[in-house]
Image: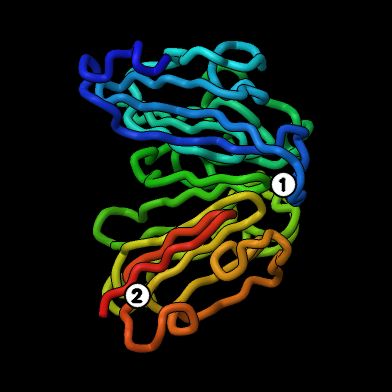
């Protein structure tokens, strides 16, 4: 089916984003519940194509029925990201929109229910745009990452400061947003890359952030911070960490190796080093 979209005529694929969530709409803590997926394909010419389970209307068909044939959902798109049961996009005109589960962005209380969703592309809730300053500076949105019960937003500080901030919003049922176990319609600040772009704890503005079901893990040269599922050190999905824990890379990589970056998920983790 995807071959019918003639990849060569669209200048190739620019970005991919995948949503994965429990088929029974549970909270992502069961190790026996099956998951379903939806896929977003952003082509270099700005066309966004969606296909998949569509249980929260995230495939842009206007309903919540399975989308078995790729849907040419929206054009003039610069970036696409995965949030909690929703896709978020930035247009060529720097508009930020979402489609799918509203509770995944602002929590079930503010959304009016955990199953509330939008099936057409919609401006982000005002709680998100106002708190993050995206109503005035949408260009500062650098990345969106999400999994069940949490969505994280990476925001660039004003040009020249060299700082990236991590904010989190959503249901936050198990404290994966690091600050507490309350719902957050207005994003709360979790961390920043550096107090100073040169001398801060990160020593550079680079940021590693992994967000999955009930899990937010971020790290830099001075170690990593974990809240929720510990997918970096323990992938059994049995260990929910709260309060947040800090660890050093030496315990995972050896003291003679220099940390470069990491990535992790429910089925494994990779830590890159330099000797």
Image position, residue 225 (x, y; %): 54, 71
Q: Quadrant of residue 96?
A: top left
Q: Is residue 166 visible in this depiction of the protein?
A: no
Query: What kind of element bears circle 2?
Result: strand
Q: Is residue 174 above or below residue 203?
A: above
Q: Is residue 192 above or below residue 128?
A: below
- Crowding at dot 1, Cα within 10 Å, few <14 / some 14-19 / many 20+, comes out as many
Query: What kind of element bears circle 1?
Result: loop
Residue 111 in the figure: left or right of residue 208: right
Image position, residue 92 (x, y; %): 30, 26
Alpha carbon distance from label 2 to label 1 = 31 Å
Which residue lies at the image location 34% right of the left edge and 34% below the top edge?
Answer: 15
Q: Nearer the viewer, residue 134 or 52?
A: 52
Rendered-image quadrant of the N terminus? top left
Which residue lies at the image location 39% right of the left edge and 21% below the top edge?
Answer: 48
Q: Is residue 25 visible in this depiction of the protein?
A: yes
Rendered-image quadrant of the C terminus? bottom left
Q: Is residue 231 above or below residue 259?
A: above
Residue picked out by circle 1:
28
Residue picked out by circle 2:
259
Which residue lies at the image location 44% right of the left edge and 40% below the top edge?
Answer: 134
Image position, residue 244 (x, y; %): 64, 71
Q: Determine contact: label 2, label 1, CB under 8 Å.
A: no
Image position, residue 185 (x, y; %): 66, 44
Q: Nearer the viewer, residue 138 or 20?
A: 20
Which residue lies at the image location 50% right of the left edge and 12% below the top edge?
Answer: 69
């Amino acid at each position: 089916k995807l071959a019918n979209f003639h990849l060569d005529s669209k200048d190739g694929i620019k970005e991919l984003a995948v949503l994965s969530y429990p088929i029974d709409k549970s909270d992502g803590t069961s190790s026996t519940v099956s998951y379903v997926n939806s896929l977003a394909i952003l082509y270099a010419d700005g066309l966004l194509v969606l296909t998949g389970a569509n249980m929260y209307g995230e495939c842009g068909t206007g309903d919540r029925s399975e989308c078995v044939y790729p849907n040419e959902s929206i054009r003039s798109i610069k970036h696409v990201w995965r949030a909690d049961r929703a896709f978020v996009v930035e247009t060529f005109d720097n508009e930020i929109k979402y489609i799918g589960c509203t509770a995944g962005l602002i929590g079930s209380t503010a959304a009016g229910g955990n199953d509330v969703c939008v099936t057409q592309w919609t401006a982000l809730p005002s709680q998100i745009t106002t708190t993050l300053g995206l109503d005035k500076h949408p260009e500062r949105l650098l990345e969106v990452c999400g999994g069940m019960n949490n969505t994280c937003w990476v925001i660039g500080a004003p040009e020249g400061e060299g700082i990236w901030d991590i904010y989190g919003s959503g249901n936050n049922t198990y404290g994966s947003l690091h600050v507490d176990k309350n719902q957050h319609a207005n994003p709360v600040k979790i961390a920043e890359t550096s107090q100073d772009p040169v001398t801060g704890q990160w020593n550079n503005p680079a940021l590693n952030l992994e967000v999955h079901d009930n899990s937010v893990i971020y790290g830099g040269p001075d170690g990593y911070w974990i809240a929720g599922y510990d997918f970096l050190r323990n992938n059994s999905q049995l260990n929910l960490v709260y309060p947040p824990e800090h660890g050093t890379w030496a315990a995972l990589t050896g003291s003679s190796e220099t940390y470069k970056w990491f990535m992790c998920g429910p089925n494994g983790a990779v830590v890159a080093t330099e000797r």
